[in-house]
Image (cartoon, rainbow, N blue to C red):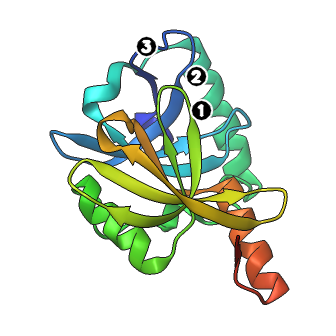
Amino acid sequence: MANNLFELYLEDDADSFVVGTAVAETPQQLLIVSIDDNGQVDSVELIGRAHVSKIVTDTTYLEFCQSMIAENKAVNAFDPFQLAEQLPTSWQSMDRLLTECQNERRLISLVTDSEIYTGHVSLISAHQIGLQLVDFESLSFGAPTLIDKSDVMVIDYVSRQNNYVTKYWQHKGQKPKKD
């Protein structure tokens, strides 16, 4: 995985980037495994190519990331939650991925240029996504929030944070409450 590492810059944000590697792609989107700043797997993301401003593959920072990844792999700490193994089966289109997430009641995050929304998919229409947002203080869900599909730059199919919340609910033996 580390040999194809890149920095991916999203539109309108020249200062920050996602470090990762592509595991699959179509002309419209990339399915990537992102790496955090400790050299560990952070998430599996679907990124719309229309929102990508550039991809860089040869930087000193990526060399540093490669060394952290190697160290983490040596001590079995690269992907401690096996997130990179949790690839979606229907990622080739946004609607198919969202339908899969809705059917699984999967906790996902949607990233726009101004917000990160986390919750369960409750509606998929031609132009909008309904997401029942999770309240991280009460670990419950509120009313659905509508998000324009054209604003969604990244879908976190599985992430470390969402994995923690899901495992917490499973450990407590309860399903998340609806407000």
Q: Nearer the viewer, residue 72 or 28?
A: 28
Q: Name, please, the residue furthest toward the left.
A: 27
Q: Which of 177 and 154 is in front in this view?
A: 177
Q: Is residue 84 visible?
A: yes
Quadrant that contains the C terminus: bottom right
- C-beta proximity under 8 Å, tags 3 and 1: no
Q: In this rendering, would 52 be left or right of 121?
A: left
Task: Give the residue at mark 3.
Answer: 12
- Which badge, 3 or 1, is on the more N-terminal residue? 3
Disc 2 marks a residue whose amino acid type is Glu
Give coordinates of residue 80: x percent, y percent.
71, 62
Give coordinates of residue 146: x percent, y percent.
43, 50
Element at label 1: helix
Please say if 97 is above or below 128.
below
Task: Give the residue at mark 1.
Answer: 66
Task: Give the residue at mark 2.
Answer: 63
Element at label 3: loop
Q: In this rendering, would 89 be left or right of 144?
A: left
Q: Name, please, the residue furthest toward the bottom.
A: 173
Give coordinates of residue 133: x percent, y percent.
60, 57
How dense is the environment of label 1, judged by Cα within 10 Å: few (below 14), some, or many (20 and up)?
Answer: some
How dense is the environment of label 2, judged by Cα within 10 Å: few (below 14), some, or many (20 and up)?
Answer: some
- C-beta proximity under 8 Å, tags 2 and 1: yes
Residue at x 32%, y 43% (from the top left corner): 149
Please say if 74 is above or below 49.
below
- Which badge, 2 or 3, is on the more N-terminal residue? 3
